Image: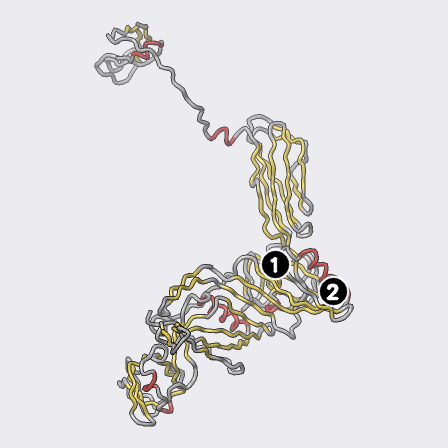
Amino acid sequence: MATLQGTVAASGEGFDGNANLTPELAEYTVDFWPIHEFIGGAAASSAFIDNTPIAQVVLATLAGAFAPAYRPDYYFRVHIRPRALNLGAVATSQEIEIEVWSAHFVSNTLNAINEDGTEGLALVGPAAPPTVFLPLDSRVYTLSADPVGPAVVDALWTFLFDLDTATLEVSGDRVAPFPFPPDWNEPVLERLAWLTDVLVAHNGKEQRQRVRANPRARFEFRIMHGGDFERVSLENLIEGWQSRIFGLPLWHQVSVAPAAIPAGSLGLTVATDGAQYVAGGLVGIFRGIEAELVEIASVGAGSLTLADETVQTWPAGARIAPVRLARMVNSQSITYLSDAIAAANVAFELIGEEAIAAASEAADYLGEPVYLDRNDWTEEPDEEHARIWERIDQETGAWTVDDRAGVALPARSHALLFDGRAAVESHRAFLAARAGRLAPIWLPSHQNDLKLVALVGSADTSLSVENRDHARWVPSQLGRRDIMIWLHDGTRFYRRILSAVESSETVEVVTIDAALGQVVQVADVRMISYMRLVRLAADAAEIAHETDAIARARLRFRAIRDDA
């Protein structure tokens, strides 16, 4: 048996009992505090002999693995934060702080910093190599990125230390402004495209699922420039940059600088109402085909605060416009009207999706909004009546059809004219609320479909109208049973026709689901229009900007079943 050495503490609370040791401890001589029989008193020590009648156990050989903690992950190496940096689209001068930390517990000498692909970039530190980093020393370097340089940023800095090697990787794409304004003899066409999955049942009922959160945007416009300088500049820009990222001005939202803009300016006076300026986005300043892009820090009422100073001096009358990042389509043609005059219809697709705030709409009728923007009658609307039917034909004898839906689901065009940027933005918000083919809306025909011929009492639930064969053909048919009664004072009633009967050759009586709640004279009625529940017929919608304030649009709606 082994002899174990123990020590009795000079003070403390003790308990009765004997110290029983495991057989493994018999292999060692250890110092310990045994169980003792007193409280307080002077320290004492003595030898204990283990007399436990237990046979000695042979120790087993145990295998293990090294489990490192955070210490070797943090220390004994050089850290660069961030180690990989994506600059994104470099449209303006940028400065980013880079931290270099020598996480060694001894001094570490930085001998050199090797560079590769760093044209247009600069990395400046507090001391040029060779320089000594003290134990756990951290230093901040400044990375500067200039918009002038190779189209693709793919740079590498390698820090060569005595004890370690670390790298900084920088990537990104430079942005070239597209300074050629449109020829306003033709409109600037804006196309917004959502994405909806529409499943149509055998009877015409639909299930619609939104696939794209926000629309993709495309702009098309015609440019024409006379003179060799502009022509060659356009050719060279397309030749060298067509597959790269452009800074595309929204030419339909251009403002004119009221005064000169000196170099070093951190603010711009510009009309922001109805313009698509966003904090963190870009604003462009243009004169001729000269351009400068600057990042926006914040947008105010009639002004912009810039994140960086302007580099150039711009005179009064310079054009100012919001700028979006875009790519030119992969096939671009140029037409030469003479040896010096060039024209082109250019098309750009914005990078990413265009976030548009959806209009706030009320559930005007049966849980859905009613669209009250009337058709622009300078353009002729059309309505296509189509049914979901199957032709049954054996190629011999008579043939027939299976009308699966049992109702017509026509498509109707709707032309619109917008006067002012606020009206255009309101229409874009309406399109965002529709989200392409996703969200339905009630569409009145805005035509005199029914003509009232007799006074309507406040409690009446029947209307005497001119006999136009409603009772004969569509007494309460889907698509012909919902009406808008529009009075000259602006009041609108939305009602459902429950039934209709022919009262005479000239009059028929329609029964509605609820009284109007007021007396309505025949002369009070501006029009009574049929309404259909519709959705947009396509996920894409276009806006033709004819000037910086006037625009047109032509929508196509398709009727859907409102009994789904």
Kind of residue at badge 2 = Arg
At label 1, counting other C-alpha atoms closer than 10 Å, the crowd grade (few under 14, some 14-19, many 20 or more) is many
Residue positioned most to the left: 16
Element marked by disc 1: strand
At label 2, counting other C-alpha atoms closer than 10 Å, the crowd grade (few under 14, some 14-19, many 20 or more) is some
Kind of residue at badge 1 = Arg
Image quadrant holding the C terminus, namely bottom left
Circles 1 and 2: CB atoms closer than 8 Å: no
Which disc is residue 288 wearing?
none
Residue positioned most to the bottom: 505
Image: 564 above or below 374: above
Is residue 314 something that shows in the picture? yes
Rendered image quadrant of residue 283: bottom right
Image quadrant holding the N terminus, namely top left
Q: What is the image's colouring? A: secondary structure
Is residue 488 something that shows in the picture? no
Image: 307 above or below 76: below
Identify the residue at image location x=51%, y=32%: 74
| Residue that numbered label 1 is attached to | 327
Q: Position of residue 258 (x, y in %)?
A: 65, 69
| Residue that numbered label 2 is attached to | 231
Rendered image quadrant of residue 275: bottom right
Question: Upstream in the sequence, badge 1 or badge 2?
Answer: 2
Q: Position of residue 304 (x, y in %)?
A: 58, 62
Q: Nearer the viewer, residue 540 or 82?
A: 540
Q: Nearer the viewer, residue 252 or 263?
A: 252
* C-alpha separation, residue under disc 1 versus residue under disc 2: 20 Å
Identify the residue at image location x=66%, y=61%: 178
Element marked by disc 2: helix
